[in-house]
Image (spheres, rainbow, N blue to C red):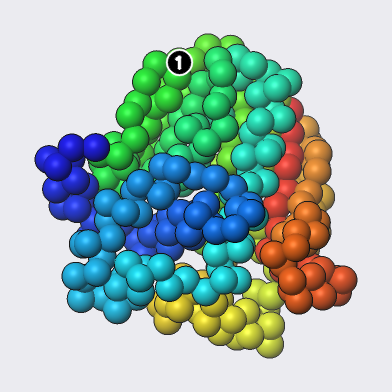
Amino acid sequence: MTETGRKAQITGLEDISTMALVTLFSRAIESQSDAPILRDEWAVQMSEALRPALAASPDPLRRTLARNEIKPILRLHVALRAGHYDQVTRAFIDKHPHGVVVNLGCGLDARFFRIDPGQAFFFDLDLPEMIAFKRHFLPESERYRMIAQSVFEPDWMDRVAEAGERPVLFLAEGVFIYLEPNQVHTLISRLQQRFPGCELVCEVFNRRWLTWPFKSIANWSIQQISGMAGQPIYHFGIHKSDEMESWGKGIHLLDDWTYFDPNHPKLSWLRWFGKRELFRKILWTVHYRLS
């Protein structure tokens, strides 16, 4: 990474959401911890390159990132989620060595470089400002491409289709929960129509916690954990993992996963929540096939 590159990266930092930086630093800090849940050397390099600019930021939260001050529960959440999505992606590639993986709302994630995908094709999709910033850090190649578009602009699918007739896995890690329900419905319908037989792995929120009085509790908790008073409120939720099957013919639940399933030692006392159904599936992941 050249000095010129570092200056270019810092230039676009103001356009990057604080939450994207929080997830980046969470992966970096966890990577350097004892017995890390995942190893992400690119996250470590990016966080080190950004640290001086964040330390000088007028935003107090960004300055805390420069000091690696992220609440352990948030760092754990990010690491466990990223580790699981890595695992699902590896399993998909093992089954489909020449398949395609599309990371929707990718942020500053570097999954392509973490999992050594062999001959598979990867696409990272996010808004133009995010992709412009990310391109200063991560090198594109024949099998790794970035697409600078909103997920709601359907012509990005043309870029993915250029990879040819291949099995496709879509990842929506921490994306759908911020969208409106009708937006999620429309997007899934488009994926199913354009890529029949594709798989979708996405994080979902429990709709019960979007209603009073649970919503105020959930919002307060999210803001306390993230440290961001202005943290976006979740909008999309489902009641149970197979709910999307009712959205249309050909939508089939393959699997689901919660943060408590690994029973990881780093969960410590949080494992208690995994034994209570009300809390076990507040935020979890579902895996569907869209036939």
* Horizontal relation, residue 254 to residue 166: left or right: right
Please name the amino acid that badge 1 sits on.
Glu
Residue 109: x, y in percent? 45, 45
Is residue 166 shown above or below 228? above
User: If the image is split into quadrants, where does the C terminus sit?
Assistant: top right
Residue appearing at x 45%, y 19% in the figure: 143
SS state under label 1: loop
Residue appearing at x 45%, y 43% in the figure: 41
Question: Is there any visible trace of residue 237 in the rendered image?
Answer: no
| Image-quadrant location for residue 22 | bottom left
For label 1, the residue is 162
Residue 191: x, y in percent? 59, 33
Question: Is there any visible trace of residue 162 in the rendered image?
Answer: yes
Query: Along the line of sight, which residue is nearer the eye, 236 or 93?
Result: 93
State the residue lying farthest toward the front. 34
User: If the image is split into quadrants, where does the N terminus sit?
Assistant: top left
* Horizontal relation, residue 232 to residue 9: left or right: right
| Image-quadrant location for residue 80 | bottom right
Query: Along the line of sight, which residue is nearer the eye, 162 or 79?
Result: 79
Query: Along the line of sight, which residue is nearer the eye, 266 or 154?
Result: 266
